[in-house]
Image (tube, grey):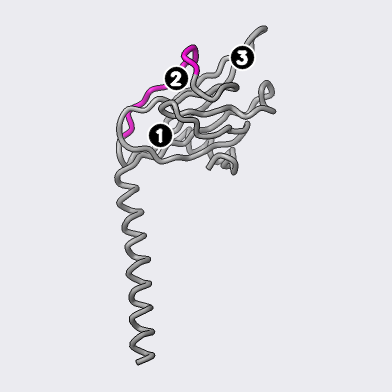
């Protein structure tokens, strides 16, 4: 009886773990991966940049770091700024159409002027995006 119970327990655990793996694979097929890289720079480097997607704040990304998120397919708006809890209308958001199973790479840079700092978002091709991510580390505070 004990052997039967042990076999049943092991089989049940195996089936539960298999379902999680299958579910994760299904999720990967239904989402797109978005990698957001913050360029290393002198100005503004001590301050985290607030990153937003579709008006929801993801986190404050530090200089020389990146973050990866999964999004559902469809049109999304990516923006970043130093201050405020909601995306500013004056900023320059980047709109993109995410496809399931695809991976996207974006670089956030800033340009300092006498009285202001502008934040820019640009899309990178896959090879450059992968290279930039190798040069940076994932931001542990952006999860």
Front residue of 90/96: it is 90
Q: Is residue 68 left or right of residue 11?
A: right
Give the residue at mark 2.
93
| Cβ atoms under marks 2 and 3 closer than 8 Å | no
Residue extent of the magenta highlight: 88-98
- Residue at coordinates 58% horizontally, 33% vertically from top-left? 61
Label 1 crowd bin: few (<14), some (14–19), many (20+), radius 10 Å: some
Q: Is residue 91 within the magenta segment?
A: yes
Q: Earlier in the sequence, mark 3 or mark 1?
A: 1
Task: Tell me the residue at 36%/71% (across/down).
Answer: 14
In the image, is residue 38 above or below residue 134?
above
Q: CA distance from mark 3 to mark 1?
A: 26 Å
Looking at marks 1 and 2 on the same chain, the residue that comes earlier in the sequence is marked by: 2
Question: Which comes before the other along the chain, label 2 or label 3?
Answer: 2
Q: Residues within 10 Å of mark 2 (few under 14, many from 20)?
A: many
Residue 68 is situated, as x and y percent measured from the top left of the image, at 48, 40
Q: Quadrant of residue 111?
A: top right
Q: Position of residue 5 (x, y in %)?
A: 36, 85
Q: Is residue 115 magenta?
A: no
Q: Which mark is residue 20?
A: none
**Residue that mark 1 sits on:** 104
**Label 2 to label 3: alpha-carbon separation:** 15 Å
Reply above or below: 125 against 121.
Answer: below
* Residue 116 spot, x, y in % from top left: 63, 11
Tell me the quadrant of the picture where the N terminus can be found: bottom left
C-alpha gap between disc 1 and disc 2 = 16 Å
* SS at mark 3 in the image: strand
- Numbered disc 2: secondary structure: loop
Give the residue at mark 3. 117
């Amino acid at each position: 009886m004990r052997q039967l119970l042990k076999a049943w327990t092991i089989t049940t655990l195996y089936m539960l773990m298999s379902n999680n793996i299958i579910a994760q694979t299904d999720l990967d097929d239904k989402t797109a991966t978005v990698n957001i890289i913050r360029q290393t720079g002198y100005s503004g480097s001590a301050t985290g940049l607030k990153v937003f997607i579709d008006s929801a704040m993801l986190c404050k990304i530090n200089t020389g770091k990146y973050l990866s998120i999964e999004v559902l397919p469809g049109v999304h708006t990516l923006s970043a700024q130093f201050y405020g809890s909601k995306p500013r209308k004056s900023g320059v958001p980047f709109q993109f159409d995410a496809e399931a199973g695809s991976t996207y790479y974006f670089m956030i840079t800033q340009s300092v002027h006498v009285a202001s700092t502008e934040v820019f978002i640009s899309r990178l091709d896959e090879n450059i995006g992968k290279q930039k991510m190798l040069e940076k580390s994932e931001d542990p505070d952006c999860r």
